[in-house]
Amino acid sequence: DTGVSQDPRHKITKRGQNVTFRCDPISEHNRLYWYRQTLGQGPEFLTYFQNEAQLEKSRLLSDRFSAERPKGSFSTLEIQRTEQGDSAMYLCASSSPGTSGRFDSYEQYFGPGTRLTVT
Amino acid sequence: DQQVKQNSPSLSVQEGRISILNCDYTNSMFDYFLWYKKYPAEGPTFLISISSIKDKNEDGRFTVFLNKSAKHLSLHIVPSQPGDSAVYFCAAQGAQKLVFGQGTRLTINP
């Protein structure tokens, strides 16, 4: 299977601890995205990479959050000093240039997500 | 501000009938629109998309309609099947990222 994978699927941590999530995109995709989803809401954009370059970060991504994609393949999302408000589903998606010829017509494919619970 | 809105939190449709899910957006800079389906404990699954230069795109039982003047899109599923029961999200693409609506929970009744 060559879909997007995320690890771990579930993480329970105590407030104040650091956590790190991993995402492996579809192998030929050069763009990788992180989103966060809370109950009853749609996913919200956090950040995205083109190859190893982090090109945009949302204002939702506080200083406690950091994301990396060191070799342009897998990515990690770290949350330091977790707070209860960080409890959410963290989703990773990847995409590649569309075939329509339009630069921005990328369809994003999502992984299963990592559900974080901060107690 | 909520740039993409799905005003119906839930929709119930009888098996075999048409399901119509609606979505409104406010930002005229969005140029690509997508529908995703989500089951519990899974990530969103891409269903169908449409470019802003088109007004209709069809893929099997799924058709997406785009009305740019009204800033409105809809997803039609016909005929509806029990396996279609899920939460459906519309999303709009702008500046390389997706902006999602809140989702509509579709229930297909036998």
Image (cartoon, coloured by chain):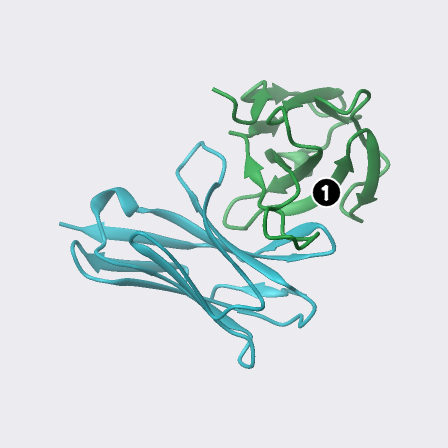
Q: Residue at x 61, y 36 (%)?
A: A93
Callout 1 secondary element: strand
Q: Is residue B61 left or right of residue A53?
A: left
Quadrant in the picture for the N terminus of chain B: bottom right
Q: Amino acid at mark 1?
A: Leu
Whole-percent x and y of residue B96? Answer: 71, 50
Q: Colour of chain A?
A: green
Between B35 and B1, the one lying in front of the other is B35
Whole-percent x and y of residue A40? Answer: 50, 49
Is residue A8 positioned above or below A113 on the image?
Answer: above
Q: Residue at x 37, y 60 (%)?
A: B63
Q: Residue at x 74, y 39 (%)?
A: A48
Between A16 and B17, the one lying in front of the other is B17
Is residue A86 positioned above or below A40 on the image?
Answer: above
Q: Classify residue B92 by image quadrant.
A: bottom right
Q: Is residue A98 left or right of residue B104?
A: right
Which chain does tag 1 point to? A
Whole-percent x and y of residue A41? Answer: 54, 51
Q: Colour of chain B?
A: cyan
Q: Classify residue A94 by image quadrant.
A: top right
Pointer 1: what residue?
A46
Give the farthest residue toward the left.
Answer: B110
Q: Please tell me how crowded label 1 is: few (under 14), some (14-19), or many (20+) other residues with Cα within 10 Å.
A: many
